[in-house]
Image: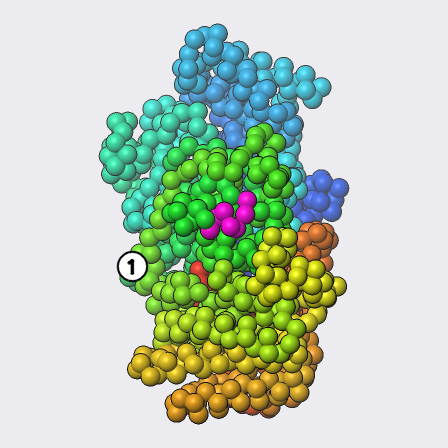
Amino acid sequence: MNKFIFNFSSKEVKKIKNPKNILGGKGANLSEMGRMGFPVPPGFTISTNVCDLFYKNKKKLNSKIINQIKSELKVIEKVVKKKFGDLKNPLLLSVRSGARVSMPGMMDTILNLGLNDETVKALSNKTLNGRFAKDSYRRFIQMYGNVVLGVESHHFEELIENYKLTKGVLLDTELDESDWDGLISDFKKVVKEKTQKDFPQNVYDQLLGAISAVFLSWESNRAKIYRKLNQIPSEWGTAVNVQSMVFGNMGNDCATGVVFTRNPSDGSNDIYGEYLINAQGEDVVAGTRTPQYITKKARKDANVKDPSMEESMPKVYKQLEKILIKLETHYKDMQDVEFTVENNKLWILQTRSGKRTSKSAVKIAVDMVKEKLISKKQAILRIDPSSLDTLLHPTLDEKSEINVIANGLPASPGAASGKVVFTSEEAEKLNDMMQDTILVRVETSPEDIQGMHAAKGILTARGGMTSHAAVVARGMGRPCVSGSSEIDINYESKIFKTSELEVKEGDIITIDGSTGRIILGKVPTVKPEISGDFSKLMSWADDTRKLKVRTNSETPIDTKTARDFGAEGIGLCRTEHMFFDEERILSVREMILSKSKEDRAKALAKLLPHQKKDFVEIFKIMDGLPVTVRLLDPPLHEFLPHSDKEIQEVANVVGVDLKEVKSRISELHEQNPMLGHRGCRLGISYPEIYEMQCRAIFEALVELKKNKVKSAFPEIMIPLVSTEVEIKIMKELVNKIAKTVQEENKVKIDFMVGTMIELPRAAVKAKDIAKHAEFFSFGTNDLTQTTFGISRDDSGKFLNDYIDNKIFDIDPFVSIDEGVEDLIEIAVLKGKKQNKKIKLGICGEHGGDPKSIAFCSRVGLNYVSCSPYRVPIARLAAAQAEILKK
Ligand code: ADP
Ligand code: MG
Ligand code: MG
């Protein structure tokens, strides 16, 4: 393409397919608003392609482009009847950045360009307003000095502050023409001192310098960081908009402001915004003067006296209101609009889709469907599923005072306050006494489950977003800040230290799992409101999606929560979590330490009623829905005690001496437990364990049936299968127990037997495995670990290097990796080939990740399963996947 520069009013823009890619968001919208007949100051856009050329040409503009810029400038001069650099009626320009997507505050804008020692006099004469002309010039030197010449802005600000102090005034508006005159010469001195050059007086030099600076700001550090956080490719580049200036700082019939077409914090359909009289550019957001409200209603609600724009400039306000309505109808979304009023004339300077809170996003989407502005499908696509998280957890009341003492990773959203405790026992003890705690650990292990449940929040010094603490906390819906390297925990003295202070056991802290902040003291929280709009949106999502959404849950509380959030069954009920309960762990340990089959049977018999009771409760809550129960999975040593005191306790119960227990513990030690004696390998070695678990499931069903209580439908799942014979033996075991229990009770029971697919061999040999499995559930956590040969718990150490070096785009434990996807696809095809009716689901952490959910939908799974608090997220993501599939 040969055309690099587009006038806002150019008809050619209409022919561009994706105008935002070429003109940037700001440029494309300015041009569109111009064509719609709105008052936009004339100007042109230098396309994003030039950004690329600029960097290829040693960071210089080539002569062809410079010539195009000059000829476009002529067009503006003609329209506004002013001339650039003229000594009678000078044209002033703004030079504005604008990438494809808005990157607020990341790049630079320069206003009042074209002023120098001569043109400033002309401006003063022409407008008969010397103060305005000098104010504009000093602003220009400040902005240009900073952005283009690299003079730090505090140098200028200090000069203004000192001057005001000497003069004894508070506000910039109290400075007059001669004051600014003095400051202008001081500003120029600073520029000379810092850059060894005079402030440029040639207006063309100024213009090319500013355009280059905007291109350069694309590669500034802050822009790079912003791009990385928001996954914006660096190839996109920025466009530059050159526009004639309009002035909000010419007097009291002038103003500048920012306005949203709806309220961005609660979504109500009221215009909401702020403005300042006699001001320019970013004065509204700079915070030096307090801006006033746009509407009378907002002013009254906030109980302030300063008149709203609706009251002080009623005519202009009416015009603005009309334009806002048209803009919203045109873009079919809430708009964030920048405007300026010059001598009672309104100018629109920018429009874009407004950023908003999750709450208002939901309300606006639902309202717009009611207003017939958008379709239900569009409404579903508008909401980022992950953002619903903030609607489901209590959040900090940001209005209160907050003393942040350290930061960590935002591992599980929501906020919690409580007394600091360093052990799970202490958390449980205080919980029994109805006291709130924050469990602070270097890292957590499966043994901490009870304590994590008892605590209101979890804080760890080590471990990433997928560490044990993070995963379990998300599953339980507990707020969690993980991996805070800024805290130093000392279990012995029961304190943790930050660089500044010491926090003792019993001190109260607050953690914010949505941002990773660790705060001293109790901060009040606000409870989430699951409003009518939210459930309306969810009902549309449910009507749209084909993929079912289940939950991972093993406690009655979590199961109930998940059902309330719309779970359509349990996709993973981990029976080992039921083993960690205080009453049971001793029997579990007794079972593991038994030397003979008989002793083991005795210990298992003690566990049976407990497991049965859990199943009864869960089956009741999930009545009529499927519940996938996974038989024991982790290696047995995870259940064994570490402290001498606990080891002694077990020794007493089992009736052997301490030494023997210790030697059994070391016998069970494994070099690589992830690949060791676990999953169905336990079922092969100790069938009586699985037999007890099956009996508990079946007896629970019998009990419910006898009491005429509606039950869930159990799907018994065998973990870590890799061969056909394993699943065959396990299935026979399950069927044998089913037969016995049915005969004992003369009651018929219905169930399914299936397997997890979590090893590459299982995926590849899925056809053989499907001969004996009625369902597959993809355990993508382990499947990812075993596909890569990476241990999730150790990956934290090098994962960042992999992301920095672009080996991984995203953590494969967060979004399913391509290679793992291929394995799943193979297993789906082969499984279906063997058994057309095979039921397919996923139960790894990925089941709650929108990107992975889209894959599950494409590959034809029947359901995803995720932690209770992610159920609504998965429902929405599944609906989006369905819409985008077509
Ligand atoms: P950002 O992308 O950071 O919002 P902008 O390019 O929108 O930066 O510029 C910031 C502000 O500068 C605008 O909100 C507006 O107040 C002011 N501004 C920009 N262009 C003009 C102009 N042509 N006339 C008057 N003010 C302008
Ligand atoms: Mg702007
Ligand atoms: Mg597993």
User: Residue 236: horizontal and vertical position, in percent?
Assistant: 62, 52
Q: Looking at the image, which residue is at 49% across and 18% down? A: 134
Query: Dominant secondary structure of the magenta stretch?
Result: helix
Q: Is residue 685 found left or right of 850 in the rendered image? A: right
> Which of the 4 image quadrants contains residue 707?
bottom left
Amino acid at circle 1 = Gly
Relative to 41, is 22 above or below? below
* Residue range (magenta): 422-428
- Is 425 magenta? The answer is yes
User: Residue 216: horizontal and vertical position, in percent?
Assistant: 66, 39
**Is 649 or 308 nearer to us in this picture?**
649
User: Residue 183: horizontal and vertical position, in percent?
Assistant: 53, 14
Residue 558, visible in the rendered structure: yes
Count the marks: how many? 1
- Is 335 magenta? The answer is no
**Is 317 or 836 nearer to us in this picture?**
836
Residue 416, visible in the rendered structure: no
Relative to 771, is 358 above or below? above
Q: Looking at the image, which residue is at 53% across and 35% down? A: 504
Relative to 169, is 324 above or below? below
User: Residue 449: horizontal and vertical position, in percent?
Assistant: 52, 57
Q: Looking at the image, which residue is at 45% across and 35% down? A: 521
Q: Secondary structure at mark 1?
A: helix
Q: Which residue is tagged 1?
A: 532
